[in-house]
Image: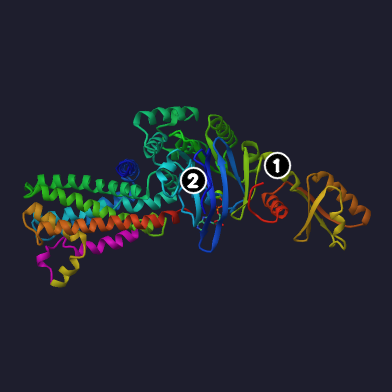
Amino acid sequence: MASGRFLWQSRAALAVAEKDMRIYYLKPPVLIFGIFFPVCLFLAFAFGRNIPMPVLLPGMLGMTLFFLSSSTSPLVAPWETLSRTLERLVSTPASITAIVAGDIFAGAVYGIGISLFLLAVSVAALGIAPVHPLVVGIDICLSAVCFSALGSLIATLPTDSPGNIMLVLNVIRLPLIFVSGVFMPLGDMPAWGRTIAACSPLTYTCDLARHGLLGSGYFPAALSMGALAAFTVGFCVLAVFLHKKSTPRRLA
Amino acid sequence: MGVVSSPMTSNSIEVAGLRKDFGSLRAVDNISFAVAEGEIFGFLGPNGAGKTTTQRLLTGVLRPTAGDIRIMGRDLRKDPVAAKRHVGVVPENANPYRDLSAWHNLMLMGRLYGMAKKRREQKALQLLEYFGLLDRRRAKTKTLSKGLNQRISLSMALIHDPRLLFLDEPTSGLDVESTRLIRRLIVDLNTRGVTVFLTTHDMQEAARLCDRVAIVCRGRIAAIDSPDALRADFSSAQSVEVAFEKPLRDPALLQELASVSGVRQEKGKYILFTDRPGEVACRVALLARERGLGLRSINTRAARLEDVFVHLTAAKGSGNGER
Ligand SMILES: Nc1ncnc2c1ncn2[C@@H]1O[C@H](COP(=O)(O)OP(=O)(O)O)[C@@H](O)[C@H]1O
Ligand SMILES: [Mg+2]
C-alpha cells in the first residue's frame, strides 16, 4: 500500500519533471543566468592571472553546476502561478511533495547534463585525466540536487514575478561564489574566511571536485560528501514544507 | 461532525459543515450538501459568493478550515489520491501550458492520473477529434484562441475518463460556438453517467443544464432547488425600477399595486419586485398620472442573483439548508 503510493507519486514526479524540461530549459532567464552569467564570471577571473587552467577547473565546475542547477527550479512555481496552470496541477492526484520533487529533479538534470558536457570538453582540451572519476560523478549528482533544491526553496517566496525571483536568486548566488573557495583554494584563505566557507554547500562541491579531478582537497572526501548530503536533505525537506504552505496562497 | 453515509451510498460528493476562512474573511460558511451519482449539480451565485473557493476545497486544492468532504465515498483529507483519481477538474480561468502543444498537455495529464502510454494516446486522439483539434495538436497552445484553449482544458480534465467532473465557470467569456460545444458536452457526458459539478453565475445556464441547483451567496447556500422551482424564484425576482420627481408621501401605494410582491427603496428609487414587470410598469405609469406624481424614469429589470438570494433568505428566515 505504502510502496504502491510511493511508486504512483514517483511516476507523477517524473511526469512533472518532463513537463519542466520541455517548458523551462529554454526560457531566456534560464539561459542567461544559468549559462551566460557563470561563463562571464569565469572568464573575468581567469584572464590576466597567472593561474594554470587545471587548478581553475574544479572551481569552474562548481560554479557552473551551482548556476545551472539553481536556474530552473526557482522559476517554476511563479511561472505556473502567472500562467494559471498551477491549480490544475495541484488538483491531480500528484502530491505537493511529488510536484516539488519533479521540479528539483528537472533542475538537477539540467545542471548535470550541461556541466558534464562542459567538463568533458575542458578535460579533453587540457589533456588531464580525473584522478577519482567516481568522486567527480558523486560530486556532480549530489551538488546538482542540492542547488536545485535551494532554487526550489527560493520559489516559495511570496511573489509571482520571475524577475523578482531572479533578483533574489542572484543576491544569494553571487556572494556564495566569493565565500566558497571557487577561485581560491581553501588552504590559502584566512581562518575567518574558512569559517564562512564551511557554511556554504558550494565549498564542498568545489573541494570535492578538486579531490576528484586533481587528487587532493582541503577536507577529506567523505566529509565533503557528508556535508553536501546533509545540505541536500535539509534543502529538500524545507522546500517541500514551504511549498505546502505557499502553494494554496498562490491561488488568489 | 461526521458525514452521514451508508456503505451503499451512491453520492459522488458529500459535504458536511464545510468552512473556509481567509484571515478574517469567511469565504465558505458552514455548508452541507450531497450530490448524487449521475446528477448535474449547479452551484450558482454572484461574484464573490464563494463558488471557486468551494470547488477548490472539493478538488483538494485548498484545505478546509473545518468540515468533512467525501468524494466518491473517499475521505478527501485521509485518502486524497483515491478521492482524486476519478475526478476531472476545469479550474476557473485556467490555461493549458502555453509552451506545450495540446498533445503534450494531454500526455502530461494522462501520466499524472497514472494512465498507461497506449491508453492515454488513444484517449487523447479521441478527445482531440471530438473537439476538432486534431490538426492543431502539435501547435503550442499559446498560438490558439481562447475558445480552443478552453477545449484543450476540457480535454485535459477528461483524458482519464473521470466519473465526476468539476467545472468552474467553463463558458464565461467564451464565443457562442465554444459555449454551445461545452454545454452539449456536459449533457453528453452526463448521459454517459458522469456526475457534473457546475459552478456558474449564469442562471439561464444553470436552469437549462442542471438537475438541481444550489444558490450560494456570501459563502452560504440559500436553497437547493430543481430548475423549475428556480425559474419560479427568478420569475418573482424580476423588478421594475421607478424614480419620481419628488419622494412619495405614501410609498405604500406602490406595495398595493396588483402583482407587486415587494418594494425596496434604493438610492432614491423604488424597486418593485414582480413576476410580471411589463404589467406593473403600466400600472405605475397609470398611477402616476392619476395622482399627478411626476415620473422621472421607469425601467424593467431582469432578476439578479442577489435579489433571488435576498428573497430566498427572507422567505426562510435562516440562510442555510435544503428545501
Ligand atoms: N486566496 C484567497 N485569499 C483571500 N481571499 C480570498 C481568496 N480566494 C478567495 N477569496 C475571497 O473569498 C471570497 C469568495 O471568493 P470566490 O470563491 O472566488 O468567489 P466566486 O468564485 O463565487 O466569485 C471573495 O470575497 C474573495 O475575495
Ligand atoms: Mg469564481
Q: Is residue B321 magenta?
A: no
The residue sitting at 9% across, 56% down in the picture is A55
Quadrant where the N terminus of chain A is found in the figure: top left
What residue sits 16% from the left and 62% below the top? A181
The magenta stretch spans residue A169: yes
Q: Chain of mark 1?
A: B
Is A101 left, or right, of B136 in this rendering?
A: left
Report x, y in % for residue B173.
57, 43
The subunit carrying tag 2 is B
- B43 or A156: nearer the viewer: B43
Q: Position of residue A148 (x, y in %)?
A: 27, 52
Tell me what residue is drawn at x 87 percent, y 56 percent: B253
- Circle 2 sits in a helix, a strand or a loop, which is it? strand
Highlighted magenta segment, given as a residue range: A166-190
SS of the residue at dot 1?
Answer: helix
Q: As shown in the figure, which amino acid type bears the numbered disc 2?
A: Arg
Asked if marks 2 and 1 fall on the same chain, the answer is: yes
On the image, numbered disc 2 is attached to which residue? B70
Check disc 1 and report the residue beneath it. B229
> Which residue, as the protein is rendered here, is positioned at the far right?
B290
